[in-house]
Image (spheres, helix red, strand yellow):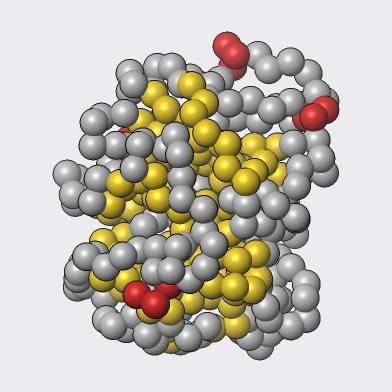
Amino acid sequence: MHSKWLLYFFSLIVCNFVNGQKLDISMVPGTVVAHSPQFSGKYIGSPSIAILPNGNYVASHDFFGPESNEHESATSRIYVSGNKGRSWIQIAEIKDAFWSKLFVHHGDLFFLGTNKHHGNTLLRKSTDGGRTWTHPTDKKNGLLLTGEFHCAPGPILIHNGRLWRAMESAMGTPKQWGKRYGNFMMSIPVEADLLDADNWIFSNILYRDSTYLNGNFNAWIEGNAVVDRKGQMWNILRVDDKTTMEEKAAFVKISSDGRTASFDPGTGFRSFPGGAKKFTVRYDNKSEKYWMIGNYIPDDIKKDNLKMNPAKVRNT
């Protein structure tokens, strides 16, 4: 997917967090796909988009917040546009779907995420453009991993005859935000049945090491599968370090067979504007550049707020 579509989509799905007031459509730079007011207690998250073989766009989001069911059986919605994003209609609501990513493979639409906040890893398939979906019932039908897992709607990458997807375990200790997360990579041959868990390879899990960054390392989450110009696969992750306004990302090396994840703390933490928040990295064949969407911290904010948590700067 070209970077321009990613930029366009992130102006589409919005949620009003300003005292429950009615959304001012004129302030939204794009077409509103979906809106959920603050007073509902259900907030829109995890935006995702894909383009179907027939040219239709499909978009998705989930609901989080105090009145949502994100911790029991999360809900996601699917929308379609037949006019390149100028208007949208809802075509499906999916139970047990959270933090999920839409992607197209061999003409079919897939939806990969968890069933809830820290839940099983599930994959669904639609053969009718997102209107109806398979229901993951066992390891042969989309139940890929059981336990407590975490992710973001990050890239599904094709490289070296395999699909790749970054994922996180939430089963570390202690069971606190950041400290519980470990990262790993999922991959599968492009011709395999994606719904069959036995066809997937899962790398080892790298859990947080409290000694990293001179003892100031809090978390690495929401990774991106990225291939560099030499063909090396990386998992590029958000890094939480509240001691500095200089943001970083973690570069975890993935072996060519997808089985081994390794990290060098001396070289793996790299300066990365926007790296303290969720971001997406893509390679664009047309421009031959890597593109990243995130929220950077302007110099004036850095200068005036040297002790601010950089993860909280999310408005640029």
Tell me if I can see residue 143 in this picture. Answer: yes
Q: Residue at the spot x=48%, y=21% of the render?
A: 89
241 displayed left or right of 58 = right
Residue 162 screen position, x and y as percent? 26, 69
Given residues 245 and 200, the one toward you in this image is 200
Q: Residue at the spot x=43%, y=72% of the render?
A: 197
157 lies above or below 287: below
Which quadrant of the structure image shows residue 238?
bottom right
Given residues 91 and 156, the one toward you in this image is 91
Q: Residue at the spot x=64%, y=74% of the render?
A: 147
Residue 196 screen position, x and y as percent? 39, 69
31 lies above or below 288: above
159 lies above or below 312: below
Which quadrant of the structure image shows residue 126?
top left
Given residues 310 and 67, the one toward you in this image is 67
Given residues 284 and 182, the one toward you in this image is 182
210 displayed left or right of 32 = right
**How many marks are shown on the rendered structure?**
0
Residue 251 screen position, x and y as percent? 43, 73
Residue 53 screen position, x and y as percent? 23, 37
21 lies above or below 201: above
Q: Quarter of the image for the C terminus: give it.
A: top right
90 displayed left or right of 300 = left
Tell me if I can see residue 316 in this picture. Answer: no
Q: Quarter of the image for the N terminus: give it.
A: top left
Q: Residue at the spot x=34%, y=80% of the render?
A: 258
